[in-house]
Amino acid sequence: MTNNDRPSKNERRAHARDVARQRAEAERRRKRRNKWFLQGGIGLGIIAVAAIVAIVVVNVNNANTVSATGPANMATGAIQFTGKDGKITPVETGAVSANGTATPIPTTGPDSTVQVTEYIDWACPICKQFEAAYADQILDKVKSGDVTLAVQPVSILDRNYRNSRYASRAANAAMCVANYQPDKFLDVQTQFYDNQPEEGTSGLTNAQIADLVKKGGATSSKVSECLSTEQFKGWVTKSTNTVVSDPALQGTSGFGTPTVVVDGKKVDNLTDVITTIDAAAK
């Protein structure tokens, strides 16, 4: 390059100004892009947070709302039985609506009739022991008309059956029988206690539950459909939560099964249940 080809001082200054101008313009564009991304990111973040909050609110509301109707013949939360002349008869009631609550008013009889309510879990080993020790004596008192019996199924032992929800499925089975064939309830209950799976296992399959229900005499196709669809799944949860949170049913370690109430008073020592009933009858 000759001296004549070299840019003049003024040309070099002009070029430098152009380069500086281009760099400044590039920097302004970069800042505009960053501002847009920042604002856009904040906006998306706000939308995402709002969406998360909405999902949480919906889930909380859904958790507190049970969209299931309760079973018929359990308007008090329990299936009730009266007796006369050696025969036990279930008390027929309507169903509790999906948004309703059970009304814990036991069936009344003569002034001398003792009202006994049992809160049980068909997956509960101690309930099985209680049944073996005292069921026949209590049912004899029902047959004579001295006692009215209410049995309320709950589900508190799912945790003991390897995430199979066995206790809840068993409680649903109890409610299916109470709803469609209440006269078979006590026989089906006996089947479940006699064939109770050990804790720590997966419990019984749906097919095995259906088989026990049939062996107990509840052979209606409506019962079978109720089992397969787990019709009262929502009500099992709702009614169990109501029972577990009732202060009157709490023991020293909270609520447990079996819990027995005689004439409105919880029996603290289950070995005293017969003497407590006899004392109430007097």
Image (tube, rainbow, N blue to C red):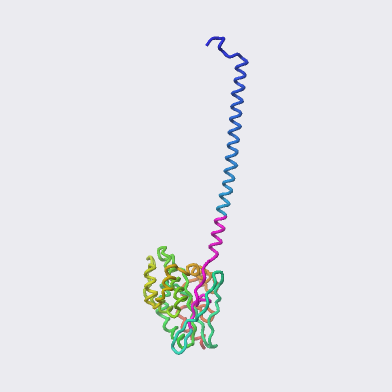
Q: Position of residue 112 (x, y in %)?
A: 53, 88
Residue at left offset 44%, top offset 88% = 86
Tell which of 251 and 162 is nearer to you: 162
Q: Is residue 163 above or below residue 185?
A: above
Q: Residue furthest front?
A: 221
Work out whether 13 lies above or below 4. Answer: below
Q: Percent from the top left, x then y, of residue 256?
A: 48, 71
| Residue visible at 37% across and 76% down in the picture | 215
Q: Position of residue 102 (x, y in %)?
A: 54, 74
Drawn side of residue 176 relative to residue 2, left or right: left
Across and down, in percent, residue 154 comes to 47, 71
Image mark count:
0
Q: Dividing the picture into quarters, in which one does residue 158 lie?
A: bottom left
The front one of 112 and 19 is 19
The answer to if 55 sits in the magenta stretch is yes
Viewer-nearest residue: 52 or 155? 52
Extreme top residue here?
3
Q: Is residue 78 magenta?
A: yes
Q: Which residues are magenta?
A: 54-81
In the image as oriented, which residue stretches furthest toward the bottom?
Answer: 85
